[in-house]
Image (cartoon, rainbow, N blue to C red):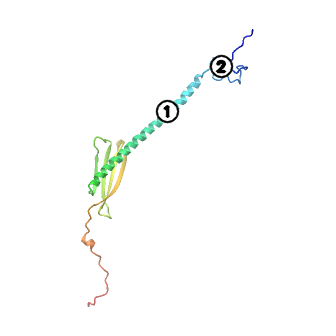
Amino acid sequence: MERVRRPRRGEVKGRGRGLGSGSDRGLGSSGSPGFTLIEVMIAVGILGIAMLALLSLHHTNLQSVIRGQELSRAAMLAQSIMTEAEMQRFPPVGKMNGKFDKDFPNFRWEREVQGSGMFPDVRKVQVTIFYGTRFRSSFSVMEFLHSPEPQQINSQEAAPTEAEPGPSTGEAE
């Protein structure tokens, strides 16, 4: 009686394990299926490079979030200083600066009020917030404030200009 051999894994019935049979893929030198050490090392290297790229991208995103938070906080603080100037209604010309309380230790402010050359009842108020490492970053807000009280015009300015000489009134010279 003849012994019938069962086909091995990867073999097609009726064919052997020769070239072109497709059954030699994934077999190591010992004949067992699996990956070689070099294949595993290459795969781990590719995964490592991909993970480094993702990690640097994550770090960049975190830095962007921090910058956005600082900028939003600077805008909020600038608006609060501008509101104080608006509460004065018509702030005096000059420069002021200061620090915020313990809640915002990395923020400083500066407020500059300038008069308008053309309009005496208008003031330009500019608020600048300095923040970040060594206060290198800044955020500015500018607003023009109008005096709620009408300005007095000097009587000399209000007088009409002299009229051009007209025809003589008949006086003798």
Question: How far is disc 2 from disc 1 in space, using C-alphas?
Answer: 39 Å
Q: Label 1: which residue?
A: 52
Give 115 or 64, whichever is nearer the viewer: 64
- Give the residue type that dot 2 points to: Arg
Residue 16: x %, y % from top left: 72, 19
Q: Quadrant of residue 164?
A: bottom left
Q: Which numbered tag is attached to residue 9?
A: 2
In this view of the protein, can residue 140 be seen by the observer? yes
Residue 68: x %, y % from top left: 40, 43
Q: Residues within 10 Å of mark 2 (few under 14, many from 20)?
A: few
Q: Which numbered tag is attached to residue 118?
A: none
| Secondary structure found at label 1 | helix
* Quarter of the figure with the N terminus: top right
| Secondary structure found at label 2 | loop
- Give the residue type that dot 1 points to: Leu
Instruction: Pick whichever of labels 2 and 1 is earlier in the sequence.
Output: 2
Point 43% across, 41% down: residue: 64
Q: Are marks 2 and 1 in contact (CB under 8 Å)?
A: no
